[in-house]
Amino acid sequence: MFNAEPAVASEEPPASEPLAALKHFRPAGRGFWADVPDPLWNDWRWQLRHRITTLEQLERLLPTLTPEERAGAILANQKLAMAITPYFFNLIDPGDEFCPIRRQVIPRLEETDTAPWEMTDPCGEDSHAPVPGLVHRYPDRVLFLVTDRCAAYCRYCTRSRLVSNAAGYDFHPEFDRQLDYIARTPAIRDVLLSGGDPLLFNDEKLEDLLSRLRAIPHVEFVRLGTRIPIFLPQRITSELCQMLRPFHPLFVSIHSNHPRELTTEVREALGRLADAGIPLGNQSVLLRHVNDDVQVMKAHVQKLLLCRVRPYYLYQCDLIAGSAHLRASVRKGLEIMDGLRGHTTGYAVPTYVIDAPGGGGKVPVSPEYVLSRNKDRVVIRNYEGKIFEYPEAMDGRPLFRASVGSLNET
Ligand SMILES: *Cc1c(COP(=O)(O)O)cnc(C)c1O
């Protein structure tokens, strides 16, 4: 099926590990923190307190730090802060400059390169906020930003303008105003809590917010958008899962991009959420040299199912200022979708979307399967490229045969 590419000198990193190796579950392990006693290592607050946030720490822990990364770490404090939990840091392969984990969380000098079409608010969220921290773009649901803090900061964050507060956005959501807007807008039946990461709140604070939301009769459905199960699986305690149970139907959307993020620790944390009856979805961002590869993505979506997580969206990377080095093409995204649909379990196939620049919302993009269509027939192709014809049904046809009555009379 594939034509062998001519051998050309290229700056591309070497091809990734085979599918089977990518799907293997490994513990992140202790790495640099072998001496830390278990109760501390497994305490999410300890992990947060010991995050890698300075160039000095990076230099000490990552002897292969490149000049681009060094410059990036210095500049991060003016744009989007650097923070990496010790747990997640252990997933970095220090010998690989192109390590897919490293590229997601270690700043690079390229973040200062901005193209005219890049934006600080690429999805036009601020212009769709009836009250600060509440984005009402679609008729029946809202995005409720609860905090500007995350356990770690993704370098391609679509909300870099406010997250971590390095750029001085001064994000101070007032829950009273956000909840009041939801309460007096009966069309809102679905609330998506995000930020920042809502699971950074302690159990009491989150329980209080969920209770106040659940007290609004027209709120049918609540979701949490979080990367904490990936950055900080220690946060997913049995107490947290127990606290969340009364708020069903409650869904959780996690964010993971590469199969290596799905460790044994993460699998256990996700299992605890699933055991609490919480349906789990995943959102991935298509990222250059991270997951812009059919084999990597196939391993990732299959591994998500092993973690009881249904791949939900694959996002084309938003046009966030300074993200060009991390963005892969839509062409590549379509190629990946073509390599998933039909080739693996339908449950494993996410919807590929572009969040329309400037604020049009998510638009699904898909390889073409309908080759032609008229009033009589539809011509389609399957995942193997074989072509089929489907005779079109007649929507206008009467529901009953006119002759049935006369048949009965004879
Ligand atoms: C993504 C998003 C939602 C949720 O969209 P779904 O397609 O229902 O997952 C809601 N509001 C905003 C502003 C969003 O960006």
Image: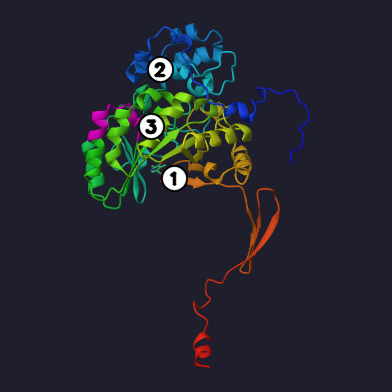
Q: Do the residues labelled 3 and 2 touch (CB within 8 Å)?
A: no
x, y (%) of residue 140? 34, 51
Label 1 CB less than 8 angstroms from ligand 1: yes
Residue 272: mark in rendering: 3
Tell me where residue 259 appears, x and y as whole percent: 54, 29
Q: On the rendered structure, is 288 left or right of 180?
A: right
Which residue is at the front of the view, 346 or 89? 346
> Which mark sits nearer the N-terminus, 3 or 2?
2
Q: Name the residue under label 1.
A: 361
Tag 1 secondary structure: strand
Q: Which residue is drawn at 39% across and 27% down?
A: 228
Q: Main secondary structure of the magenta part?
A: helix
- 410 vs 172, nearest the viewer: 410
Give how far apart the Cα atoms at labels 3 and 1 are.
32 Å
Q: Tell me which amino acid carries mark 2.
A: Asn
Q: Quadrant of the N terminus?
A: top right
> Label 1: few (<14), some or many (≥20) within 10 Å?
some
Residue 353 is situated, as x and y percent measured from the top left of the image, at 51, 43
Instruction: Say which quarter of the image contains residue 18.
Output: top right
3 and 1 marks in contact (CB < 8 Å):
no
Asked which secondary structure carries label 2, the reply is helix
Residue lying furthest bottom: 410
Q: Does label 2 or label 1 sit earlier along the sequence?
A: 2
**Residue holding disc 2:** 77
* Labels 3 and 1: the sequence-earlier one: 3
Q: Which residue is drawn at 69% across and 48% down?
A: 384
